[in-house]
Image (cartoon, coloured by chain):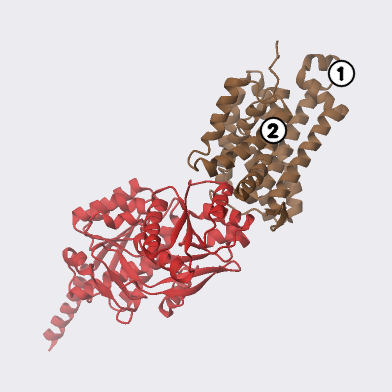
Chain colours: A brown, B red
Amino acid sequence: MSNLFDLLVAGLATGAIYALVAVGFTLLWQTSQTINFAQGEFVMLPAFLMLAAMHVGAPFWLAIILGILLSMILLGLAFKLLLVDPMMRHGVLPLAIATMALAIGIKEAVKQFYSAEASPFPSIVPTGDVSILGHAVSLQSIGVLVVAILAVLGLTTLLNRTSLGHQMQAAAQNPTVARIIGVPVERMILLTFLINAFLVALASLLITPIYLAKFSSGEVLGQAAFIAAIVGGFNQVRGAIVGGLLIGVLDNLAAAYVSTQYRAAVPMLFLIVVILFRPQGLLGRAEERTV
Amino acid sequence: MKSTLLVGAVLTIMTATSAHAQAIKLADVAELSGGGATVGTNWKNGIDLAIEEINAKGGVLGRKLEVTHADSQSNPGVARAQVQKALDAEPYVLLGPGYSGSVKVTAPLAAEAGIAQIMGGEAAELTQQGNKYLFRTSFGQQSSMPKVAKYIHDEMKAKSVAVVWVNNDFGRGGRDVVIKELDRLGSKVVADLSTEAGQADFAADVGKIKAANPDAVFVYLNEEESARILKELKRQGVTVPLMGETTLIGQKVIELAGDAANGARGHVGLTTDAPVDLIKAFREKFSKKYNYVPDHNGLKGYLAVYMVKATTEKMGKVDPKKFADTLHGLTIKAADEPGILMDVTFSDTGDIDRQSFLVEVVEGKQVVKQVLPKVK
């Protein structure tokens, strides 16, 4: 029983990170029909940007800020202007393939310019644990959960409670009408790219102390987040959150109770079941996009 | 008188040229570039240092040693081609490669040529194929794991053990031997956990360890995964003693795992930190010549050359055909041949028996806690 509790906590902590990445996934899809297969690499890269900043002498807190800003410029602004905009007019599929190429490019570049070996990465949460319901729970797990929940709460507040958020939603749901009523659609789309870049940088900061900074660490994350987004509902932010948490917990339970070898297959099987019986995802709405 | 002098001079020149012509030729194939570059470069430098020392003292049976180095690029295919090329030049003994995979594909070539091969690989299977020409410079898993199991049972007094291993040839080889030995000694294996190479998340594995509640955990993973599981063990508050092999307490793991590596213990066959005077002297000579501190691969290369010297002197002649036979079952004592650094015995399969070390990570540094004696 204590084992199950530990697994749930660890699963929720990893799931919260998947959720951050999956939310970014759905945001890009909603506003610009971008399926970003480089999302995992987007999580891997900010850690290296932060490490690079620390190499040139920046203290950790400054490296975090620089890393997040640089991520927003590279993975938000530059990604949209240099890759998404030119490819978009050729359709969803060429763009998706272009992001796959980008994933390979980012991975190889990190390997070449940094190292193929893993590097340690400092944690923003101190080590140690607290007692919850008689169980020792690590501060790191709690820290990851808290930061991820705050980020998601902040995002949903922005989307649902502010005029900016309403404009973003309008731009996502019906760009033509949004344009007619004066919503600056292009700027709203750019904003979602910046938000995605911020979320992946945050995920990077949370996950890298556990997984270590390595060029290949995005592969697992990208896949998990992609599955999470589809399971939860590709067109719903809250769907992505639920999907992320669910996949995190499922992955840990599978590793513990099924087998380590097949752990990666269990979320996939779950994905197949969801697609067969509820194709729009657990919390998703059936797509009604028309031309 | 004049003619005597002339004859003498001619004779001297002749002897000098013939000694030069009859230098004993060794061939080295090592990982000088690619992923194993650190391994191969240490190995090569160790060889060069030993040869320089031996030649400065007059060589082996009055003949100098010569070595050619070839680069396997850390690739078994290239290693095979380079070994074939080296064997065509009919060397006295073949040195290297260091990677088990490269040894596996080159050993049949050397055996076919009837040339002894002294190599750096550690996979258990290498010396279990009935090859009569293959010799190790360090422990294979079948030599190191019994020592690990004995330490877990005798010193850690663990009645129950969780074994975590990486699911590849290296991990499975070690796991099979250690579980057999633990069973034999009477320590119960309460969790037998296979993990994947490159695995990032160890939360579930550590959860299973906690559930099994063992007296000790034996961790046998590659470096990065070792660091990740050490962090996860600390994160989930596992405080039972951790035991491993060379990979668990390596410098890279300590760097990656930080605090979490403290307290981890491991068995190490060769380390330049060993409290052995001859090894300390070696480390000093090596560092002086190459401006860096060697790892255990530098020791292996150095030992390989002194194995050639001791065996040849034992035979009393340079005979490549008899070399392997002589080295089988041979015990070389450091008192007789200081270059061998520690007393060592070679088995009929080319495996070695030698004292080894129990290392603990204390405040981010490897500290040798105990010297484990030879098995026999």
Q: Residue at x 31, y 71 (%)?
A: B306
Q: In the current view of this chain or complex, which residue is farthest to the top?
A: A291
Q: Which of the pair A238/B296 is nearer the observer?
A: A238
Q: Determine crowd level at label 2: few under 14, some 14-19, many 20+ residues with C-alpha closer than 10 A.
A: many
Q: Residue at x 66, y 50 (%)?
A: A52
Q: In the current view of this chain or complex, which residue is farthest to the front?
A: A1
Q: In the visual, does A241 lie left or right of B68?
A: right
Tell me the amino acid under the disc marked 2: Val
Q: Is residue A196 visible in this depiction of the protein?
A: yes
Q: Is residue B44 visible in this depiction of the protein?
A: no
Q: Which of the pair A91/A161 is nearer the observer?
A: A161
Q: Chain of mark 1?
A: A
Q: Residue at x 21, y 59 (%)?
A: B132
Numbered mark located on residue A182 in the image: 1
**Nearest to viewer (mark 1 / mark 2):** 2
Q: Determine crowd level at label 1: few under 14, some 14-19, many 20+ residues with C-alpha closer than 10 A.
A: few
Q: Position of residue B144 (x, y in %)?
A: 38, 64
Secondary-structure class at tag 1: loop
Tell me the amino acid under the disc marked 1: Gly
Q: Chain of mark 2?
A: A
Q: In the visual, does B368 lie left or right of A232?
A: left
Secondary-structure class at tag 2: helix
Q: Is residue A23 above or below residue B340?
A: above
Quarter of the image where the C terminus of chain B is located: bottom left
Residue tagged 2: A242
Q: Which of the pair B14/A96 is nearer the observer?
A: A96
Q: Position of residue A63 (x, y in %)?
A: 73, 51
